């Protein structure tokens, strides 16, 4: 597998009150044969996050044809699991209704934040989303008491399958607090009530690496493919890759990810938060670059 970088796509100019900086977690919706809508999260002056979008041409995602002037999903209520910010994670259509699974985050004192998964439903105007509930669809459990979020969801027949980021513990190294994350699997019949499976799908080596996250899963015939972020002590974020025959048991093949940091520019320090999708007869990889998305996101196309 080899990805050919098309280049930088978007970073906010800072003129909108809700989007002073960052374009985090690019999440793509096919709007038509010619237009892709890429949802992302931006930060305001107080570093609170809201979800907006840009529309791009599917034949050339570097060509922007529309930009949201207001967020499509705002902060949650004070004290809610999403009162500090919301980031997009994946968008699917169920019975003609658009379901936006999002990352709700709360700032904390002893650790930086907690992340849980919310669900918002698309409104008839096609331009906004309303929360399904005030609480997460993936919340704390005795087995997963810290964070459960950044999901990707596939619909296969009557079953909905989810792969998500799960924090197994927090640790301190060199005076800094670090999350330790794995990728896990859950299923649902309605997209709201989820049953998590006990086994871990993908995990760090826990020697140098301490986190894998933001999975993006596609099914090619009898093969599931997963792209994800890898974080380690010796290197900044990079993109990893794994394969599975059943969606539950995965083999890491990071050497086949096919994309690396650039020698210079907006993605020379790190590449992270991949989102892979097909459009216009091509397979695209959208991803964030330096400073976890402060430089915005770009796009690559699969060669061959």
Image (cartoon, helix red, strand yellow):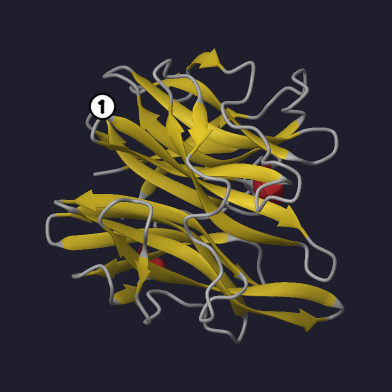
From this view, report whether residue 252 is shown above or below residue 284. Answer: below
In this picture, residue 17 sits left or right of residue 134: right
Q: Nearer the viewer, residue 60 or 16?
A: 16
Q: From this viewpoint, is residue 264 visible?
A: no
Residue lying farthest to the bottom in this orientation: 207
From this view, report whether residue 180 is shown above or below residue 295. Answer: below
Callout 1 environment at 10 Å: few (<14), some (14 to 19), or many (20+)? few
Q: Quadrant of residue 194?
A: bottom left
What is the total number of numbered labels drawn onto the structure image?
1
Measured as percent of width and height from the top left, residue 67 is found at 57, 17
Q: Quadrant of residue 285?
A: top left
| Residue located at (47% from left, 77% from top) | 203
| Residue located at (25% from left, 70% from top) | 244
From this view, report whether residue 42 is shown above or below residue 162. Answer: above
Q: What is the secondary structure assignment of the residue under circle 1? A: loop
Q: Nearer the viewer, residue 157 or 78?
A: 78
> What residue would you read off at disc 1?
280
Measured as percent of width and height from the top left, residue 272 is found at 56, 53
Measured as percent of width and height from the top left, residue 22 is found at 69, 37
Q: From this viewpoint, is residue 75 visible?
A: yes
| Residue located at (30% from left, 63% from top) | 187
């Amino acid at each position: 597998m080899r990805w050919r970088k098309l280049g930088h796509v978007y970073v906010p100019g800072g003129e909108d009150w809700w989007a002073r900086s960052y374009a985090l977690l690019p999440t793509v919706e096919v709007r038509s044969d010619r237009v892709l809508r890429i949802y992302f999260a931006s930060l305001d002056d107080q570093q609170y996050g809201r979800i907006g979008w840009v529309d791009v041409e599917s034949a050339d995602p570097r060509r922007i044809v529309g930009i949201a002037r207001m967020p499509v999903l705002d902060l949650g209520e004070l004290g809610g699991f999403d009162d500090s910010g919301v980031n997009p994670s994946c968008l699917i259509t169920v019975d003609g209704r658009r379901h936006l699974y999002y990352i709700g985050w709360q700032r904390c004192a002893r650790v930086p934040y907690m992340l849980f998964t919310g669900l918002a439903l698309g409104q008839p105007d096609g331009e906004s989303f309303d929360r399904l509930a005030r609480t997460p669809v993936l919340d704390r459990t005795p087995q997963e008491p810290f964070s459960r979020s950044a999901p990707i969801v596939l619909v296969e027949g009557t079953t909905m399958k989810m792969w998500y980021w799960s924090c197994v513990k927090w640790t301190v190294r060199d005076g800094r607090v670090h999350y330790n994350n794995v990728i896990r699997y859950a299923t649902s019949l309605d997209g709201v009530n989820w049953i998590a499976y006990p086994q871990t799908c993908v995990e760090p080596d826990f020697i140098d690496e301490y986190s894998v996250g933001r999975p993006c899963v596609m099914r090619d015939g009898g093969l599931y493919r997963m792209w994800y972020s890898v974080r380690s002590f010796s290197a900044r974020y990079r993109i990893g890759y794994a394969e599975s025959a059943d969606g539950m048991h995965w083999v890491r093949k990071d050497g086949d990810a096919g994309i690396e940091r650039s020698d210079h520019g907006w993605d020379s320090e790190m590449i992270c938060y991949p989102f892979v999708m097909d459009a216009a007869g091509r397979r695209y990889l959208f991803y964030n670059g330096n400073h976890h998305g402060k430089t915005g996101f770009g796009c690559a196309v699969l060669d061959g």
